[in-house]
Amino acid sequence: MRILNTQPIRRQVIVAATILLLPLAMAVIWSANLTVHERETELRQQATSIAATSADYLNQYLDGLDSLASALARHPDVRALHEPQASRLFADMLKEQPLLLNVLLTAPDGSVHGSALPLTAKAREPIRLPYLSQVLATSRPVVSDLTVGRATGKPAIVLGYPVFDDEHKVVAVLGMGVNLARLQMVFASIPLPPGSVVTLTDRVSRILARSLEPERYIGTTIAKKPSDPKDAPSTIMSAGIDGVERFYGNAAIDRGPWLLSVGIPQSVAVTRVRPLWQRNLTILSTVLVGTFLILIWFADGLARQLNRLQLAAQRIASGDLTPPARGPVSNREVGQLQNAFITMAANLRDTRDALDRQVEQERKMREMLQSLQRQVVRQERLTAVGLLVSGVAHELNNPLQAILGTLELLERNPGLTPDALEEIGFIKTQSGRAREIIRNLSRFSSQQSGPPALVDLRDVIDEIVQLRRRSLETAAITLDTDCTSARPVYANFTELEQVILNFVINAHQSIEASERGKGRILIRLFDTGKKVRVEVQDDGPGVDLQDEPKLFQPFFTTKPVGKGTGLGLSVSYGIIDSYGGAIGYSGNAWGGATFFFELPAASAGTPSETGSSDAGDHDRPPVLHRSTRP
């Protein structure tokens, strides 16, 4: 039987699961994107907050420098422009301020009167930087633009402070050079995500300080159009000078004016979301795998149940209407389908049984009808034969009576020899036999049997042997007997003799028709249960298959014209049937024919047990007129 293939079911389940889980996957992706957007918003806020914090740190540092400069400006050696003492003072201070490149004390004419670092002859030339004139003009601290230190040659900005005498007149300018390359140390204590950068730019968008690679980028302009730092947005996302996308938080520093920007890489948002993504993907993968496994398990279970139902349907289609066994089901629908199959099989079986009973009844009715039809045909034939035989029997009976009367007169003649008397006795016997045959013909025509009596079939067989031995010996045919039964039957002696004689004559003629020159006939008498059976076997050619159904029909004969009337077996059939017996034909081991009849065995003095002609037809055993070959 073909087993249902589970692959299509699995594919359908997987497709259905995919369709059902697709919204979940889309929701997960949407949630991940939303989380990234939220993290980016957090980074924007964080960048703005760090920028404000960094600006405070820078302002605090500058305020510290202002305090230091104020103290230095009030020092007597500085106010007196004593170069050696001022230089030593500046040098000591420089050791404590690692972010300062140098401290210069400059007279209003630009001459240098003190330096924290040794100066070369060129460095001692008068200073003409803008911050010097601005301090002299305003008497206030100023911040220079980006410049290069004379003594260090490094980029720097100079914080210029006025030095007043007792009359509050500017007698000198104190300049502090800030090391821009190390300015990021101000922001070192501020925690920043990896890849973040703190950038300080002036009003022309020129980089003054940068926490990453300052030597490389200080002095680089990052904007095409200079803008006021106060006009910069608080947060923006853009690619930095190094090409990295960052979220920038901006804070303006009025001292410069400068713009302090804190840039946090956009990748930080992804980095922060990655654990959440991994967790969500793990959960989603677990759900998907678990769902697929459950669905595949469900599909396999459903396929097994459908296979069981398919096998049950195939058994039903092949004719086995046994209801399938009830098995476990995964859901109510499959259970209802299983119950429907069981009910269908039970109904089909009941219907088939009902049809079988109906067909059997119709077959019996058809056989009964055919039997009745055969009886009608037989009765019509027997009626026609009876009309003919009754007339022939009447015409033959008168000459036989005359013959018998003449024989009786001859027997009274004293001059006859013993041989003549023996011949006369033989003629009387045969004449009596002819008379009995005529009587039987008369009974055949009227379907009435003669008066029965207890008959020993051995005597009947002996009579047949005596009558036919001479003619059989002449034909080189051996006649043997095998009589093992001694039970009598209740019948008419002459009728049974006629039946057996018909069997022997037919066997004789069958052997002669074979033209072999010799043959063998065996008469058997034996018991079969409560019946006595007589068989006449020969080694002739037997009976053709097409002739077997017609053997006991009136006027059917296979003999040449003039050698048979076709009434012998038909009359025998009627005789045996009248005593409640069975008559029939079969082949034998010799290759010839075996004709037989069976009669109920009788006990002496109990004619009611024999099933005579007075018994009802319903008490008679069936007549075996069909052939059964061994």
Image (cartoon, grey):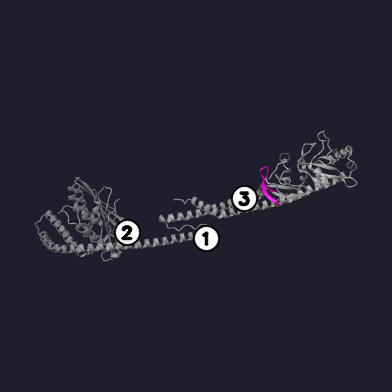
Which residue is denoted by mark 3 in the rendering? 281
Residue 332: which numbered mark, if any? 1
- Please check the rendered image and state whether residue 241 is part of the magenta-colored stretch, yes or no: yes
User: What kind of element bears circle 3?
Assistant: helix
User: What kind of element bears circle 1?
Assistant: helix
Using the rendered view, name the quadrant where residue 75 is placed: top right
Answer whether residue 210 is visible to the viewer in this image: no
User: What kind of element bears circle 2?
Assistant: loop
Direction from residue 103 to residue 432 in the image, left or right:
left
The residue sitting at the top extreme is 121
Of tags 2 and 1, the one toward the viewer is 1
Mark 3 and mark 2: Cα distance apart in space: 95 Å
Mark 2 and mark 1: Cα distance apart in space: 65 Å
Which residue is denoted by mark 2 in the rendering? 530
Name above or below for residue 61 compared with residue 378: above
Mark before the other along the chain sequence, 3 or 1: 3
Name above or below for residue 195 compared with residue 573: above
Q: Nearer the viewer, residue 629 or 456?
A: 629
Direction from residue 8 to residue 92 in the image, left or right:
right
Please state the horizontal and vertical placement of residue 518, each as a whole percent of the image.
20, 46
The residue segment tinted magenta is 233-247
Amino acid type indicated by mark 1:
Arg
Using the rendered view, name the quadrant where residue 112 is placed: top right
Direction from residue 37 to residue 448 in the image, left or right:
left
Mark 3 and mark 1: Cα distance apart in space: 35 Å
